[in-house]
Image (tube, rainbow, N blue to C red):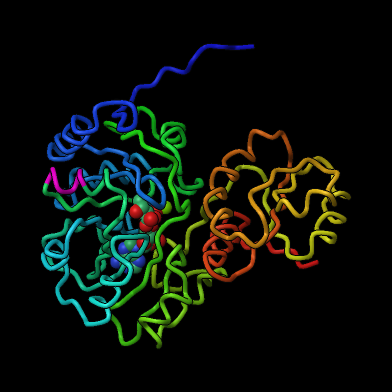
Amino acid sequence: MNNTVKEINTKRLDIISGDYEKCIEEASRILKNQGIVAVPTETVYGLAASAFSDYAIKKVFEAKGRPQDNPLIVHISNMDMLESIAKSIPESARKCAEKFWPGPFTMVLERKPVIAQSVCGGLDTVAVRMPSEKSIRDIIDCSGLPLAAPSANISGAPSPTTFSHVLADLDGKIDAVVCGNTCEVGVESTVVALFGEKPRLLRPGAVTLEQLKEVLPDIEVDKAILSQPEAGKKVASPGMKYKHYAPKTDSFLVEGSSKAFGDFVNKKENCLALCFKEDEEFITAKKMIYGTKNDESTLAKNVFGALRDVDGMGVSAVYIHAPSKSGVGLAVYNRLIRAAAFRVIEL
Ligand code: TXA
Ligand code: MG
């Protein structure tokens, strides 16, 4: 067995067993000097840069290999920052901020010119989120900077929910990583456009459609959430047109009962079943459990780690048992249908 530990070329700022304050100060120093730092949030790890610096933002796009037209989310720690970024703040936005911030919720508003052009991918809107994770909020406060931060993965790969995932993708390409706990939510924030005539859900997350309807009764759900955007057609959220979250292994999403799912995968050769605990007794094929059927929050917390683990299983295909589309299940379904390149098998 090869016991050599892979050399790490990225500065590690350990906020769990190290000096918390010093780590926050160092991350802030690097960001103020236009460096790029991966940071934990309650959703997934983000790759942060000053939202005022085109130079730093360019490095984020390069490190991730991200298409230039896919805009970033700007992270803030207080409402004054929102006022300084957004051109106008409609009543709906104030209500959402009161109800869902700090937390896994992002609103898209018309923007002011202070935000670096490259953050917004050429759009005249900006996506803004106030996270609840203490460490990123402290870094925003300490640096005084709103931080643009996409998920800290190579573009197209599953989003990172641990600092090890970040290092697996970006070691040597970023200035530092703040090493915190595993992300509590596990899928990225809910994104809602609040600048047009009607509010529109662009990406589902842990703030659920059911919760949004209580504040935004006329909210529309963008079609691209569960279906493949037509080739060449303009999409409301540029991130939705790209293949995403995919393991290298050929992936399929499968709908059906535990018994039907088991019968289906057992007939396949050299495959992996990514499944619920309830499916276990029906499956003789190789399997990996990502939670129990009715606990969508746990499925959300585990889904990206599971997708990352698939490639190490030595199989030629993975069949993923589809979760329900209710609550945060809609967010898990949305990520999985992309990981499967919209190939859904209905049993
Ligand atoms: O939970 C999250 O939101 C995480 C953490 C790090 O905060 N961030 C995240 O960023 O998921 P990213 O870049 O992976 O996803 C941002 C999404 C993309 O789908 C992008 O197209 C959309 O937000 N977006 C950003 N700005 C937008 C805008 N002005 N209009 C429409 N969509 C926008
Ligand atoms: Mg992402």
The majority secondary structure of the magenta stretch comes to: helix
* Relative image position of residue 248 (x, y in whole percent): 61, 42
Above or below residue 330? Residue 187 is above
Which region of the structure is painted magenta? 138-143
Above or below residue 291? Residue 164 is above
In this picture, residue 184 sits left or right of residue 13: right
* Relative image position of residue 232 (x, y in whole percent): 47, 70
Ligand 1: image quarter: bottom left
* Relative image position of residue 229 (x, y in whole percent): 52, 70
Does the segment drawn in magenta span residue 259?
no
Q: What residue is rendered at 86% in x and 44% in y?
A: 284
Q: What residue is rendered at 34% in x and 39% in y?
A: 63
* Relative image position of residue 78 (x, y in whole percent): 17, 60
Tell how many labels: 0
Above or below residue 113? Residue 305 is above
Above or below residue 281? Residue 28 is above
Q: What residue is rendered at 64% in x and 11% in y?
A: 1
Q: What residue is rendered at 45% in x and 32% in y?
A: 164
**Screen quadrant of the C terminus:** bottom right
